[in-house]
Image: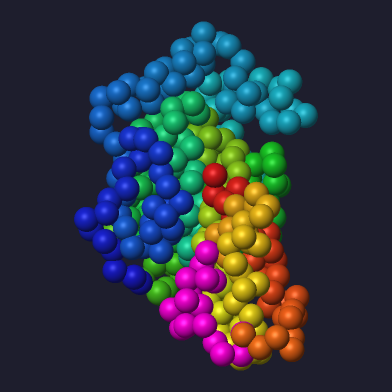
Amino acid sequence: MRRKNKSNTVIIGQGDVTLDQIIEVAQNRASFEVSDLPEFIARMEASRSVLTCAIKRGVSVYGVTTGYDAACGNRVGTDEIEALGNNLVAYHGCGVDKPLGIEETRAAMLCRLICLARGLSGVTVDLLRHLAQFLNAGITPLVPSLGSVGASGDLTPLSYIAACLSGKRDVLFGGEILPAAVALERIGMQPYRFAPKEPLGLMNGTSVMTGIAVIAVQRSKKLLNAAIAATAPAVHALEGHVEHFHAVLVDAKLHFGQKQAGERLRAILASAGIPQESIHHEHLQDPYSIRCAPQILRVVADALNWIEA
């Protein structure tokens, strides 16, 4: 397990969280905590109050006092609300195949926590703090990689996270695969008992695909940087021409990623000096794979710029 940077604590509920911060938490290099600012607590409690009042007044609330999907016409008594939520978690425990990676799972958990901390889902602050404690302890739910419902929510994979919070299913902790209840006992945590709507709030979101995307972006950036770094020596090895990367050519079109790649290539090549072979006039053009590297790599760079935003 990587060493945490204790000086870099991510606070949930106090402004935006960056992709880099999500990655640091996913890689267990930073700890994080849920905000205790009065305005944050008030926002969470206001959302919760709306739900509580609706239940007391007998207002139909989807997935709380009604069934799900086609069964939403069915009404659920207040004495059945807790069982309805627990059944939702159990019902979706049907994932298959190998589990997601630790980084992807941790990123997904943090992304879900960030969403819930906006105070729009009617969940309690206790749930957020329990999830934060779970993550900071280094407990990782074993989430099967296949079985997500998709745009309607990563219901199946998120059900494994919800189940582990309540002491069910398996987790990875201290290099061992353990029942979640055993891992919780080892760190002195009680299994969480969900309040009304909290199972649905945890599960009905796209945080797993978001967490996976964050990790994929980070790895793609590394690959892009490696491709740029490998292209520069290839120019020398293939007796290429540095003039192909001149700013007048690379910046002629308004492709920001192309400009980025061209600037980095020129910087790397300049540090090694201008190769003698590049001044020979027998071969005026290098192969596409060399001379059009900025144009090729800019597709990835532009995509990553858009995805990050």
Q: Residue at x 69, y 31 (%)?
A: 68
Q: Residue at x 53, y 21 (%)?
A: 78
Count the labels in the image.
Answer: 0
Main secondary-structure element of the magenta-colored stretch: helix
Q: Quadrant of the N terminus?
A: bottom left
Considering every residue shown, the one lying at the far right of the view is 70
Percent of width and height locating residue 42: 32, 21
Q: Is residue 223 above or below residue 167?
A: below
Q: Toward which corner of the image does residue 7 lie, by quadrant? A: bottom left
Q: Residue at x 62, y 28 (%)?
A: 63
> From which residue to which does the magenta span run?
263-278
Q: Is residue 201 left or right of residue 20?
A: right
Closer-to-camera residue (265/126): 265
Q: How is the model colour-coded?
A: rainbow
Q: Toward which corner of the image does residue 226 lie, by quadrant? A: bottom right
Q: Is residue 242 above or below residue 154?
A: below
Q: Quadrant of the C terminus?
A: top right
In magenta stretch: residue 271: yes
Q: Is residue 156 above or below residue 40?
A: below
Closer-to-camera residue (28/249): 249
Closer-to-camera residue (153/184): 153
Percent of width and height locating residue 292: 70, 70
One can see residue 158 in this view: no
